[in-house]
Amino acid sequence: MGSPTGAAATALTPVVADVVERAGFVLDDLDVRPAGRRHVVRVTVDTPDAPAVDDGPAGGVDLDAVAAISRDVSAAVDAHEEAHGAVLGEYTLEVSTPGTDRPLTEPRHWRKAWLRRVAVTLDDGTKLSGRVGAVTDSAVTLAVGKGLQEVPLDRVERAGIEVEFKPASDAQVEALRADRTDKETR
């Protein structure tokens, strides 16, 4: 049998997802944890679209939008609690966006990381550092050094965005754009 907090997250997911999607965003994560006599409900939202081939790296969610989503999620959770009996009781709601420390675990995370520098550990322990290019449901192309390398997503043990202080070289960006354009037109 699942934990009460797991049941709360399961019950709240469609409620929260509906609010987030109506606001034009994607529910990236919903976590419910006990915190003393209360619960903490953590909602992570993201923009739905990945950058186009001619765009730079993706931007984040506007802080005003996060505040509006927070108000709407709070009202929806309160209404759900009232209509279906209190599962949470008192709770603290935290609405945020994924930070650069979010692991890249799904193809959409990789697509959002277009042209960003990432650190990758493969299932055999190999470590790569490269810039994200084209992404399919099964692989990502990385600009590693002066070349491009296709990495199967099922081989990725861990991956995350690296904080960087200088932009990609023009040659690297052009190679990634050409590769992505080629893959998207096939």
Image (spheres, helix red, strand yellow):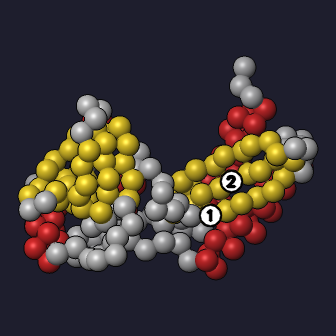
Q: Is residue 2 visible?
A: yes
Give the answer, above or below, for where 103 lies relative to 58: above
Question: Left or right: where does residue 183 sit relative to residue 62?
Answer: left
Q: Position of residue 62 (x, y in %)?
A: 56, 77
Please report the residue visible at 23 percent of the width from the left and 58 percent of the height from the top: 130
Say whether residue 183 is visible: no
Tell me if label 1 and label 2 are in contact, CB under 8 Å: yes
User: Vertically, is 41 above or below 33?
Assistant: below
Q: Which residue is mark 1?
A: 96
Q: Which residue is mark 2?
A: 42
Three-letter code, disc 1: Ser
Callout 1 crowding tier (Cα within 10 Å): few <14, some 14–19, many ≥20: some
Give the secondary structure at mark 2: strand
Q: 8 left or right of 60?
A: right
- Classify residue 63 by image quadrant: bottom right
**In the rendered view of the protein, which quadrant contains the C terminus?**
bottom left
Q: Looking at the image, is mark 1 or mark 2 earlier in the sequence?
A: 2
SS at badge 1: strand
Question: Looking at the image, which residue is at 39% across and 66% down?
Answer: 163
Q: Position of residue 91 (x, y in %)?
A: 84, 52
Q: In the rendered structure, which amino acid carries the disc numbered 2?
A: Arg
Residue ID at (58%, 50%): 29
Q: Nearer the viewer, residue 48 or 119?
A: 119
Q: For mark 2, does the 10 Å Cα neighbourhood hold few (<14), some (14 to 19), or many (20 or more) residues?
A: some
Residue at 44% x, 50% y is 103
Give the percent coordinates (x, y) of residue 81.
Answer: 85, 48
